[in-house]
Image: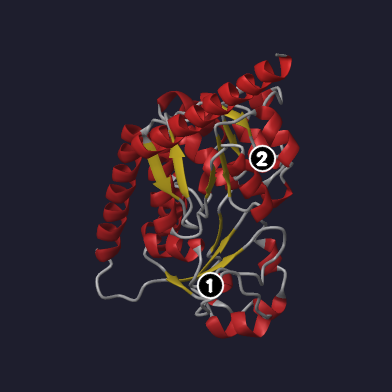
Amino acid sequence: MRIIFLFLSLILLAGCNNQNSNDKKSDSSSAISVTDIQGNEINLAKPAEKIVCLFDPSVDVIYMLQAQDKLIGIPAETYFDSELYDYYKHIDSRILNKELATPGSNELASLESIIQLNPDLVIAQQLPESVIKTLQGMNIPVYIAAAARYEDLVKEMKDISILTGKAERGEELITYAKNKIKDLEERTALQGASPHKSVYFTWANGRIFSTAGRNSMMNDCLDLAGVENACPFEMDKPNINPETLIDWNPDMIVMWNDSPDLFYNKKELGGITAIKEKQIHNLMPMFYYNPHTFKSLCAAVAIHNWAYDSKDGTNEIKEILAELYGTETSEKLIKYL
Protein backbone atom coordinates (compact mmCIF):
# COMPACT_ATOMS: atom_id res chain seq x y z
CA MET A 1 0.00 0.00 0.00
CA ARG A 2 2.90 2.37 0.89
CA ILE A 3 4.48 1.71 -2.51
CA ILE A 4 1.21 2.51 -4.29
CA PHE A 5 0.89 5.75 -2.28
CA LEU A 6 4.42 6.86 -3.21
CA PHE A 7 3.79 6.01 -6.85
CA LEU A 8 0.62 8.10 -6.92
CA SER A 9 2.43 10.98 -5.18
CA LEU A 10 5.15 11.00 -7.85
CA ILE A 11 2.53 11.09 -10.60
CA LEU A 12 0.83 14.05 -8.90
CA LEU A 13 4.16 15.88 -8.46
CA ALA A 14 5.08 15.33 -12.10
CA GLY A 15 1.72 16.70 -13.14
CA CYS A 16 2.26 19.82 -11.04
CA ASN A 17 5.74 20.37 -12.53
CA ASN A 18 4.38 20.02 -16.06
CA GLN A 19 1.64 22.52 -15.25
CA ASN A 20 4.21 25.02 -13.85
CA SER A 21 6.31 24.59 -16.98
CA ASN A 22 3.31 25.15 -19.21
CA ASP A 23 2.35 28.22 -17.18
CA LYS A 24 5.84 29.70 -17.68
CA LYS A 25 5.69 29.02 -21.42
CA SER A 26 2.28 30.65 -21.59
CA ASP A 27 3.51 33.66 -19.60
CA SER A 28 6.63 34.10 -21.73
CA SER A 29 4.70 33.93 -24.99
CA SER A 30 2.11 36.53 -23.99
CA ALA A 31 3.99 39.08 -21.86
CA ILE A 32 7.35 40.89 -22.20
CA SER A 33 9.82 39.87 -24.88
CA VAL A 34 12.99 41.54 -26.20
CA THR A 35 16.00 40.29 -28.16
CA ASP A 36 19.51 41.30 -27.09
CA ILE A 37 22.55 42.17 -29.22
CA GLN A 38 23.52 38.49 -29.48
CA GLY A 39 20.10 37.43 -30.70
CA ASN A 40 19.02 35.90 -27.39
CA GLU A 41 15.30 36.26 -26.70
CA ILE A 42 14.49 37.38 -23.16
CA ASN A 43 10.96 36.59 -21.99
CA LEU A 44 9.39 37.83 -18.76
CA ALA A 45 5.90 37.23 -17.42
CA LYS A 46 6.00 40.72 -15.85
CA PRO A 47 8.52 43.57 -15.46
CA ALA A 48 11.67 42.52 -13.60
CA GLU A 49 11.66 43.35 -9.89
CA LYS A 50 15.03 41.87 -8.83
CA ILE A 51 17.86 42.74 -11.21
CA VAL A 52 21.52 41.77 -11.05
CA CYS A 53 23.36 44.15 -13.40
CA LEU A 54 27.06 43.41 -13.97
CA PHE A 55 27.76 46.07 -16.64
CA ASP A 56 28.19 49.64 -15.43
CA PRO A 57 26.72 51.44 -18.49
CA SER A 58 23.56 49.36 -18.00
CA VAL A 59 23.52 50.25 -14.29
CA ASP A 60 23.54 53.88 -15.42
CA VAL A 61 20.63 53.18 -17.77
CA ILE A 62 18.64 51.77 -14.85
CA TYR A 63 19.22 54.96 -12.83
CA MET A 64 18.21 57.10 -15.81
CA LEU A 65 15.03 55.04 -16.09
CA GLN A 66 14.45 55.68 -12.36
CA ALA A 67 14.26 51.93 -11.80
CA GLN A 68 17.15 51.68 -9.33
CA ASP A 69 14.88 50.22 -6.65
CA LYS A 70 14.90 47.02 -8.70
CA LEU A 71 18.69 46.59 -8.41
CA ILE A 72 19.81 43.83 -6.05
CA GLY A 73 23.30 43.27 -7.47
CA ILE A 74 25.84 45.56 -9.17
CA PRO A 75 29.37 45.26 -10.64
CA ALA A 76 32.14 44.68 -8.11
CA GLU A 77 34.09 47.72 -9.37
CA THR A 78 31.31 50.06 -8.24
CA TYR A 79 32.74 50.03 -4.72
CA PHE A 80 36.48 50.22 -5.48
CA ASP A 81 36.58 52.44 -8.58
CA SER A 82 36.44 56.02 -7.33
CA GLU A 83 35.13 57.19 -10.72
CA LEU A 84 31.99 55.19 -9.96
CA TYR A 85 31.65 55.04 -6.19
CA ASP A 86 32.28 58.75 -5.60
CA TYR A 87 29.20 59.62 -7.66
CA TYR A 88 26.79 56.71 -7.21
CA LYS A 89 27.13 57.09 -3.44
CA HIS A 90 25.46 60.50 -3.67
CA ILE A 91 22.36 59.15 -5.40
CA ASP A 92 21.88 55.79 -3.67
CA SER A 93 22.41 55.22 0.06
CA ARG A 94 22.70 51.48 -0.57
CA ILE A 95 25.88 52.14 -2.54
CA LEU A 96 27.11 54.67 0.02
CA ASN A 97 26.77 52.01 2.71
CA LYS A 98 27.89 49.20 0.38
CA GLU A 99 24.69 47.28 0.97
CA LEU A 100 24.03 46.13 -2.59
CA ALA A 101 25.54 42.74 -3.44
CA THR A 102 28.47 42.62 -5.87
CA PRO A 103 28.51 39.13 -7.42
CA GLY A 104 31.56 39.85 -9.57
CA SER A 105 31.68 41.64 -12.89
CA ASN A 106 30.89 40.32 -16.36
CA GLU A 107 33.13 37.35 -17.20
CA LEU A 108 34.42 37.27 -13.61
CA ALA A 109 30.92 36.95 -12.19
CA SER A 110 30.27 34.35 -9.51
CA LEU A 111 27.53 31.99 -10.67
CA GLU A 112 26.87 30.84 -7.11
CA SER A 113 26.52 34.42 -5.84
CA ILE A 114 24.10 35.31 -8.62
CA ILE A 115 21.93 32.27 -7.95
CA GLN A 116 21.83 33.04 -4.21
CA LEU A 117 20.37 36.48 -5.00
CA ASN A 118 17.50 34.77 -6.85
CA PRO A 119 17.11 37.51 -9.50
CA ASP A 120 14.43 37.55 -12.16
CA LEU A 121 16.82 39.23 -14.64
CA VAL A 122 20.60 39.38 -15.13
CA ILE A 123 22.19 42.07 -17.33
CA ALA A 124 25.84 41.79 -18.39
CA GLN A 125 28.23 42.65 -21.18
CA GLN A 126 30.16 39.38 -21.20
CA LEU A 127 29.41 36.11 -19.46
CA PRO A 128 30.81 32.64 -20.17
CA GLU A 129 28.38 30.66 -22.30
CA SER A 130 28.25 27.98 -19.61
CA VAL A 131 27.10 30.55 -17.02
CA ILE A 132 24.40 31.90 -19.35
CA LYS A 133 23.12 28.40 -20.08
CA THR A 134 23.07 27.48 -16.39
CA LEU A 135 21.11 30.61 -15.46
CA GLN A 136 18.68 30.12 -18.32
CA GLY A 137 18.23 26.51 -17.24
CA MET A 138 17.15 27.85 -13.84
CA ASN A 139 14.62 30.20 -15.50
CA ILE A 140 16.82 33.27 -14.86
CA PRO A 141 16.84 35.31 -18.11
CA VAL A 142 20.14 36.90 -19.18
CA TYR A 143 20.29 40.08 -21.27
CA ILE A 144 23.64 40.82 -22.95
CA ALA A 145 24.38 44.51 -23.59
CA ALA A 146 27.17 46.06 -25.64
CA ALA A 147 27.00 49.88 -25.56
CA ALA A 148 29.64 49.85 -28.29
CA ARG A 149 28.00 52.25 -30.77
CA TYR A 150 25.28 54.89 -30.57
CA GLU A 151 22.71 52.51 -32.10
CA ASP A 152 23.44 50.11 -29.22
CA LEU A 153 22.69 52.82 -26.68
CA VAL A 154 19.26 53.47 -28.18
CA LYS A 155 18.40 49.78 -28.50
CA GLU A 156 19.54 48.95 -24.97
CA MET A 157 17.74 51.93 -23.47
CA LYS A 158 14.55 50.75 -25.17
CA ASP A 159 15.04 47.08 -24.24
CA ILE A 160 15.89 47.70 -20.59
CA SER A 161 13.01 50.16 -20.25
CA ILE A 162 10.64 47.43 -21.45
CA LEU A 163 12.17 44.78 -19.19
CA THR A 164 11.83 47.05 -16.15
CA GLY A 165 8.33 48.31 -16.90
CA LYS A 166 9.64 51.81 -17.67
CA ALA A 167 8.87 51.92 -21.39
CA GLU A 168 7.33 55.40 -21.25
CA ARG A 169 10.37 56.83 -19.47
CA GLY A 170 12.64 55.08 -21.97
CA GLU A 171 10.83 56.67 -24.91
CA GLU A 172 11.13 60.09 -23.23
CA LEU A 173 14.90 59.66 -22.94
CA ILE A 174 15.31 58.39 -26.51
CA THR A 175 13.25 61.29 -27.88
CA TYR A 176 15.27 63.77 -25.84
CA ALA A 177 18.56 62.30 -27.12
CA LYS A 178 17.39 62.47 -30.74
CA ASN A 179 16.33 66.10 -30.32
CA LYS A 180 19.64 67.01 -28.70
CA ILE A 181 21.54 65.38 -31.55
CA LYS A 182 19.46 67.37 -34.06
CA ASP A 183 20.30 70.55 -32.14
CA LEU A 184 24.02 69.75 -32.30
CA GLU A 185 23.79 69.02 -36.02
CA GLU A 186 22.12 72.39 -36.62
CA ARG A 187 24.80 74.18 -34.60
CA THR A 188 27.52 72.42 -36.56
CA ALA A 189 25.84 73.40 -39.85
CA LEU A 190 26.24 77.05 -38.83
CA GLN A 191 29.98 76.60 -39.34
CA GLY A 192 29.21 76.65 -43.06
CA ALA A 193 31.69 75.29 -45.57
CA SER A 194 34.68 75.75 -43.28
CA PRO A 195 36.50 72.48 -42.52
CA HIS A 196 35.54 70.79 -39.29
CA LYS A 197 38.15 70.90 -36.55
CA SER A 198 40.27 67.75 -36.35
CA VAL A 199 40.39 66.24 -32.88
CA TYR A 200 42.74 63.67 -31.39
CA PHE A 201 41.20 61.76 -28.49
CA THR A 202 43.35 60.00 -25.91
CA TRP A 203 42.38 57.52 -23.21
CA ALA A 204 43.12 57.83 -19.47
CA ASN A 205 45.97 56.70 -17.23
CA GLY A 206 48.78 58.30 -19.21
CA ARG A 207 48.03 56.45 -22.46
CA ILE A 208 48.45 59.50 -24.69
CA PHE A 209 49.26 57.38 -27.73
CA SER A 210 46.16 55.19 -27.32
CA THR A 211 43.29 56.73 -29.26
CA ALA A 212 39.80 56.06 -30.61
CA GLY A 213 39.44 54.69 -34.13
CA ARG A 214 36.53 55.15 -36.52
CA ASN A 215 34.81 51.98 -35.33
CA SER A 216 34.28 53.16 -31.75
CA MET A 217 31.73 54.78 -29.50
CA MET A 218 34.07 57.74 -29.00
CA ASN A 219 34.15 58.29 -32.75
CA ASP A 220 30.35 58.49 -32.67
CA CYS A 221 30.70 61.07 -29.92
CA LEU A 222 33.12 63.15 -32.01
CA ASP A 223 30.67 62.95 -34.91
CA LEU A 224 27.90 64.24 -32.64
CA ALA A 225 30.17 67.11 -31.63
CA GLY A 226 30.63 68.06 -35.29
CA VAL A 227 34.39 67.52 -35.36
CA GLU A 228 36.62 65.22 -37.41
CA ASN A 229 38.38 62.32 -35.73
CA ALA A 230 42.09 62.82 -36.45
CA CYS A 231 42.55 59.05 -36.40
CA PRO A 232 41.70 57.47 -39.79
CA PHE A 233 42.01 53.86 -38.60
CA GLU A 234 38.89 51.68 -38.41
CA MET A 235 39.84 49.71 -35.30
CA ASP A 236 38.33 50.55 -31.91
CA LYS A 237 41.39 51.56 -29.85
CA PRO A 238 44.57 51.76 -31.94
CA ASN A 239 47.96 52.57 -30.44
CA ILE A 240 50.15 54.94 -32.42
CA ASN A 241 53.64 56.44 -32.17
CA PRO A 242 54.67 60.11 -31.77
CA GLU A 243 55.57 60.43 -35.45
CA THR A 244 52.04 59.44 -36.47
CA LEU A 245 50.50 62.03 -34.16
CA ILE A 246 52.83 64.70 -35.54
CA ASP A 247 51.77 63.72 -39.07
CA TRP A 248 48.06 63.96 -38.18
CA ASN A 249 48.64 67.42 -36.64
CA PRO A 250 45.22 67.77 -34.93
CA ASP A 251 43.62 71.16 -34.25
CA MET A 252 42.53 70.04 -30.80
CA ILE A 253 43.28 67.27 -28.30
CA VAL A 254 40.64 65.87 -25.96
CA MET A 255 41.90 63.92 -22.97
CA TRP A 256 40.12 61.44 -20.73
CA ASN A 257 40.80 62.52 -17.15
CA ASP A 258 44.56 63.18 -17.52
CA SER A 259 46.86 66.19 -17.27
CA PRO A 260 47.62 68.20 -20.46
CA ASP A 261 51.21 68.34 -19.21
CA LEU A 262 51.61 64.81 -20.57
CA PHE A 263 51.65 66.52 -23.99
CA TYR A 264 53.15 69.89 -23.12
CA ASN A 265 56.19 68.26 -21.52
CA LYS A 266 57.08 66.34 -24.68
CA LYS A 267 59.21 68.75 -26.70
CA GLU A 268 59.11 66.56 -29.79
CA LEU A 269 55.35 67.22 -30.01
CA GLY A 270 55.66 71.00 -29.69
CA GLY A 271 54.96 71.65 -33.37
CA ILE A 272 51.48 70.11 -33.30
CA THR A 273 48.79 72.77 -33.80
CA ALA A 274 46.74 71.72 -30.76
CA ILE A 275 49.81 71.95 -28.54
CA LYS A 276 51.14 75.21 -29.99
CA GLU A 277 47.76 76.87 -29.57
CA LYS A 278 47.10 75.21 -26.20
CA GLN A 279 43.94 73.55 -27.43
CA ILE A 280 44.04 70.59 -25.06
CA HIS A 281 40.85 69.91 -23.14
CA ASN A 282 39.84 67.36 -20.55
CA LEU A 283 36.65 65.35 -20.05
CA MET A 284 36.59 65.10 -16.28
CA PRO A 285 35.19 63.88 -13.99
CA MET A 286 34.74 60.89 -16.28
CA PHE A 287 31.41 59.90 -14.69
CA TYR A 288 29.63 62.77 -16.42
CA TYR A 289 30.97 62.05 -19.90
CA ASN A 290 30.77 58.27 -20.27
CA PRO A 291 30.50 57.71 -24.05
CA HIS A 292 28.93 54.28 -23.48
CA THR A 293 25.76 55.89 -22.07
CA PHE A 294 23.46 58.73 -23.07
CA LYS A 295 25.97 60.94 -21.25
CA SER A 296 27.85 60.87 -24.55
CA LEU A 297 25.62 63.92 -25.15
CA CYS A 298 27.52 65.71 -22.37
CA ALA A 299 30.84 64.82 -23.99
CA ALA A 300 29.62 65.91 -27.43
CA VAL A 301 28.38 69.27 -26.12
CA ALA A 302 31.65 69.92 -24.28
CA ILE A 303 33.76 69.07 -27.35
CA HIS A 304 31.54 71.10 -29.68
CA ASN A 305 31.80 74.16 -27.45
CA TRP A 306 35.58 73.83 -27.15
CA ALA A 307 35.91 73.50 -30.92
CA TYR A 308 33.55 76.19 -32.15
CA ASP A 309 31.85 78.28 -29.50
CA SER A 310 34.80 79.10 -27.23
CA LYS A 311 32.53 79.00 -24.21
CA ASP A 312 31.99 76.98 -21.09
CA GLY A 313 29.31 74.36 -21.68
CA THR A 314 28.77 73.54 -17.99
CA ASN A 315 25.24 74.94 -17.80
CA GLU A 316 24.17 73.02 -20.89
CA ILE A 317 25.69 69.84 -19.45
CA LYS A 318 23.73 70.40 -16.23
CA GLU A 319 20.56 70.68 -18.30
CA ILE A 320 21.36 67.37 -20.02
CA LEU A 321 21.96 65.64 -16.68
CA ALA A 322 18.64 66.98 -15.39
CA GLU A 323 16.85 65.42 -18.38
CA LEU A 324 18.72 62.11 -18.11
CA TYR A 325 18.39 61.54 -14.36
CA GLY A 326 15.44 63.68 -13.36
CA THR A 327 15.53 66.74 -11.13
CA GLU A 328 16.08 65.07 -7.76
CA THR A 329 18.98 62.83 -8.78
CA SER A 330 20.63 65.38 -11.06
CA GLU A 331 20.69 68.00 -8.30
CA LYS A 332 22.72 65.60 -6.19
CA LEU A 333 25.14 64.96 -9.05
CA ILE A 334 25.77 68.42 -10.46
CA LYS A 335 27.20 69.59 -7.15
CA TYR A 336 30.33 67.63 -8.05
CA LEU A 337 30.56 68.56 -11.74
- Closer to viewer: mark 2 or mark 1: 2
Q: CA distance from mark 2 to mark 1?
A: 27 Å
Q: Which residue is mark 1?
A: 213
Q: Position of residue 244 (x, y in %)?
A: 61, 84
The quadrant of the image that shows the C terminus is top right
Which colouring convention does the figure follow? secondary structure
Marks 2 and 1 in Cβ contact (< 8 Å): no
The secondary structure type at the circle numbered 2 is loop
When asked about the image quadrant of residue 71, the answer is top right
The answer to whether residue 126 is seen in the rendering is yes
Q: Which residue is mark 2?
A: 75
When asked about the image quadrant of residue 14, the answer is top right
Mark 1: few/some/many CA within 10 Å (<14, 14-19, 20+): many
Q: Nearer the viewer, residue 139 or 39?
A: 139
Residue 176 higher or lower than 308, as above or below: above
At a point 40% along the width and 45% down the height, the residue shown is 34
Q: Amino acid at mark 1?
A: Gly
Q: Amino acid at mark 2?
A: Pro
At a point 31% along the width and 37% down the height, the residue shown is 172
The answer to whether residue 101 is seen in the rendering is no
Q: Position of residue 35 (x, y in %)?
A: 42, 50
At a point 47% along the width and 66% down the height, the residue shown is 219
Q: Nearer the viewer, residue 133 or 164?
A: 133
